[in-house]
Amino acid sequence: MDIVIIGLGPGDASLLTAEAKEVLDNAKEVYLRTRRHPAVSSLPTHLTVHSFDDLYEAEEEFSAVYEEITTQILKLAQRAEGVIYAVPGHPLVGEESVRRILALAEEGDLEVRIVVGVSFIDAALLPLGIDPLEGLQIVDATVLAGRLHPNLDPDLPALVGQLYSRRVAAEVKLTLMNLYPADHPVTILRQLGTPEAETDTSPLHELDHLKEVDHLTSLYVPPLPNPSSVSTFHDIVARLRAPGGCPWDREQTHQSLRPHLLEETYEVLKAIDEEDDVALREELGDLLLQIILHTQMAVEAGEFTLAQVLETIIAKIVRRHPHVFDGLEVADADEVLRNWQAIKRAEKPQGDKPLWGMPLSMPALTLAQRAQERAKREGLVSPTQEQLLAEIDRSLDRLREIKDEEKAASELGQLLFTLADLGRQLGVDAESALRIATIRFGETVAPPPSQREDAEDQNHSNE
């Protein structure tokens, strides 16, 4: 046997497996990833014990530590007697050095024997009183700390391992708070697998202020109290569309839902315009319902899945943001937009009509401003504000003289296009500006006398 990797369990030596004890009793020496483990003090006294703790002091990054451990273990494996390497917990749970050793050992045709151990997951089940088959998610704290949004389903419980320092706890807290409310109760698990094991529940926002966060600390995050995940929502929509579901939902098609998609989009815009956060939360949900409905129809037709929708947009966003994901340096937002358009042109060549990759079904004023902005990015020279104002005056003069309806429509269209360009240069969204003006008009215009009387009569009857 070239390499034997032993799991020392989560803590107390009493949790060592019979196989692990047998290997250690018959061994002459063992290499430990770290001596910072409760079972180490109970190892057989005849063993020569080495550890790699000095590497943690010498290297700044854990990845460099694990790389050096792997190199040394593979070198030791070349000896006639091979090497025994022992790690905390289970060798295949949260052990980066073991993963590296297994990968390189296979390349080097080295034989590896894994001696399993009790993991921190097993030790956590009893104090938490949970069944992992009910959907327990397992995640490394260092992985969470490196993300801005957690890769977790909030409708399922999660167990976070290797919460080994207050700094990591602070970073994990910030990541989790992108999905969970600040007062969501979480449970700290300390000294798992030892007689000193204890749990402590507190609000998420206090996670990095708790005492004794160390290498034997884990975190349990219970599910949110109410269904809140995209997967749960998609399941509900699928049920609406399934046999025995809602007759109305089952009848819908992409075309029949088209006006609803447009209406919900405008409801979102209304909430944004009114700066109504409560309404915005609700309206974004209504818009998401439309997206999931369309996706579920595609699933039923065998066309694509929600995962494929997300795969496509994730790849696109990463590809079109090389300054964020690929180290490209940019000077400002204008350069970002130029890069975006260049990448987009490479993906979807537009031939000799570069403007018309846009959906022509969008509102006309928005379409005009998008076309003007894209023309600018394509290098076309835009009129100045003074030139636009002069053109507006000329257009108004022409409209005063035009009697033909078709010519008037053409001139009015050109005037609106010019006004949209002026709005763009002033930083005004023409569509929103016209909507606000229309709403203001509706609020200032009084109803005819007959309607006022009818309204007063209705109010009296209600009294």
Image (cartoon, rainbow, N blue to C red):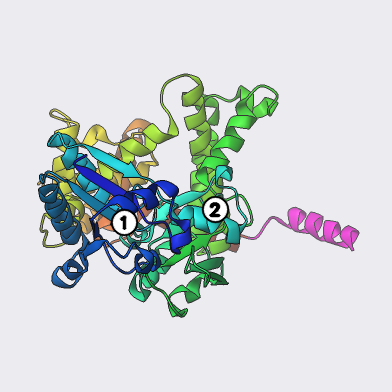
- Which residue is the site of mark 1? 87
Is the residue under label 2 in contact with that under label 1 (CB below 8 Å)? no
Q: Which residues are magenta?
A: 446-463
**Is residue 149 on the magenta stretch?**
no
Residue ID at (19%, 49%): 83
Can you tell which quarter of the image residue 237 is in? top right
Foreground tag (1 vs 2): 1
Dominant secondary structure, magenta: helix
Q: Is residue 327 left or right of residue 27?
A: left
Badge 2 is on which residue? 157
Residue 458 appears at what percent x and percent y?
84, 56
Q: Is residue 258 visible?
A: yes
Q: How many marks can you see?
A: 2
Question: Residue 391, relative to residue 186: is it above or below?
Answer: above
Which secondary structure lies at badge 1? Answer: strand
The amino acid marked with disc number 2 is Pro
Q: Residue furthest top?
A: 301
Q: Residue at x 43, y 59 (%)?
A: 10
Residue nearest the observer in this picture, 389 or 342? 342
Along the viewing direction, whichever of 223 and 315 lies nearer the viewer: 223
**For marks 1 and 2 on the same chain, the one whose residue lies earlier in the sequence:** 1
Q: Is residue 85 left or right of residue 282?
A: left
Question: SS of the residue at dot 2?
Answer: loop
Q: Point out which mark residue 106 bears.
A: none
| Image spot of residue 257 (x, y percent) | 54, 31
Q: Position of residue 197 (x, y in %)?
A: 52, 69
> Which residue is painted at 56% across and 42% down in the image?
133
